[in-house]
Image (cartoon, helix red, strand yellow):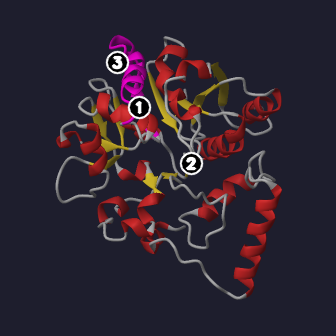
């Protein structure tokens, strides 16, 4: 009998192609499991719903059941989205997971849409979180001597540094714990009362409320590409590079699908999953004028053999 994994993601109409590509990579690398896929959304149009549902048909061969979980943006009326943010209100949808999923679902793995999966997640999913609220990858582990980023966030949020700070793009969530302790409402109340502090949206709230009630998981389960941008050149990334990534998280404001950077980490792997997905003809949601300008610049750079070297290339240690 196959193991079942409960997977949660959140999307609006604009992010459906990214959600679908992420799910394609998940299903491709976890064929030994049945996957109940819960997609939290608000008023998704019929075409996008049909495309996502197509992932569960016999034609794909994926052993998954797609469940749409409806929420209302009105629920998040007091949650800030600021000018220039590269996220929408959908970033907050995950906070309602224990309230809108069936009560028999006691544990889920939440995955952002700007992710691809390159290996089995069976071991991650079976991590014991029975005594904590969630498990996630650290950006600051609360210790000295390991990868240390996001200390300024801890200071801004005003909680003990020993808690560390985690990235919310990959979350193994103990739904039983959340329901018992009314975590969803506590998180939304925290955001409403601390809008000026929550510069990183749900992630800041999750750390401030649950920082002392979590477990850290290996970095291979959230390979964060922003760490390879010039602003983090001085950080020692050895601990981050110890294991081959199983989950690659394109968590930079500029995404590989928005602008072709020759050295963007694992962009070829993402292209592979795009081309085998139902969204193989999708490139990005840019207006046509911007698409043409960027295509021209990309063509020009290739013609003169100019490489846009932006990223630290130490990630290539794990390039297939």
Residue 320 shows in this picture:
yes
Tell me which numbered mark, 2 or 1, is placed earlier along the sequence. Answer: 2
Q: Based on the picture, tell me whether residue 189 belongs to the magenta stretch.
A: yes
Nearer the observer: mark 3 or 2; the answer is 2
Whether the magenta-drawn stretch holds residue 120 is answered as: no
Tell which of 130 and 257 is nearer to you: 257
User: Which residue is located at x 56 percent, y 44 percent?
Assistant: 83
- Residue hosting label 1: 195
The percent coordinates of residue 18 (x first, y second) are 66, 45
> What residue is disc 3 on?
177
Instruction: Pick the residue in front: 268 or 257.
Output: 257
State which quarter of the image contains the N terminus.
top right
Across and down, in percent, residue 29 comes to: 58, 47
Pick whichever, 3 or 137, lies toward us: 137
The quarter of the picture where residue 312 lies is bottom left
Magenta stretch in the rendered image: 170-196
């Amino acid at each position: 009998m196959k193991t079942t994994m409960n997977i949660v993601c959140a999307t609006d109409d604009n992010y459906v192609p990214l959600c679908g590509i992420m799910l394609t990579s998940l299903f491709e690398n976890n064929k030994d499991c049945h996957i109940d896929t819960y997609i939290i959304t608000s008023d998704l149009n019929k075409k996008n719903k049909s495309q996502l549902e197509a992932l569960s048909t016999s034609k794909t061969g994926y052993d998954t059941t797609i469940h749409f979980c409806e929420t209302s943006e009105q629920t998040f009326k007091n949650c800030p989205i600021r000018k220039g943010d590269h996220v929408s209100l959908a970033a907050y949808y995950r906070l309602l997971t224990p309230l809108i999923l069936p009560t028999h679902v006691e544990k889920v793995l939440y995955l952002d849409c700007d992710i691809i999966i390159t290996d089995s997640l069976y071991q991650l999913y079976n991590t014991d979180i029975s005594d904590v609220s969630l498990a996630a990858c650290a950006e600051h582990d609360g210790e000295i001597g390991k990868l240390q980023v996001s200390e300024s966030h801890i200071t801004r949020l005003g909680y003990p540094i020993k808690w560390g700070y985690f990235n919310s793009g990959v979350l193994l969530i103990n739904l039983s714990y959340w329901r018992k302790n009314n975590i969803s409402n506590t998180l939304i109340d925290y955001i409403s009362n601390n809008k000026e502090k929550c510069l990183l949206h749900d992630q800041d709230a999750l750390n401030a409320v649950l920082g002392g009630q979590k477990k850290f998981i290996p970095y291979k389960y959230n390979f964060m590409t922003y760490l390879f941008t010039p602003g983090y050149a001085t950080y020692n990334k050895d601990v981050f590079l110890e294991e081959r990534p199983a989950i690659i998280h394109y968590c930079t404001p500029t995404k590989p699908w928005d602008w072709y950077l020759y050295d963007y980490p694992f962009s070829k792997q993402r292209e592979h999953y795009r081309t085998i997905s139902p969204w193989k003809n999708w490139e990005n949601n840019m207006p046509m004028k911007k698409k043409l300008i960027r295509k021209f610049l990309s063509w020009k750079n290739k013609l003169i053999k100019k490489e846009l070297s932006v990223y630290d290339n130490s990630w290539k240690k794990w390039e297939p």
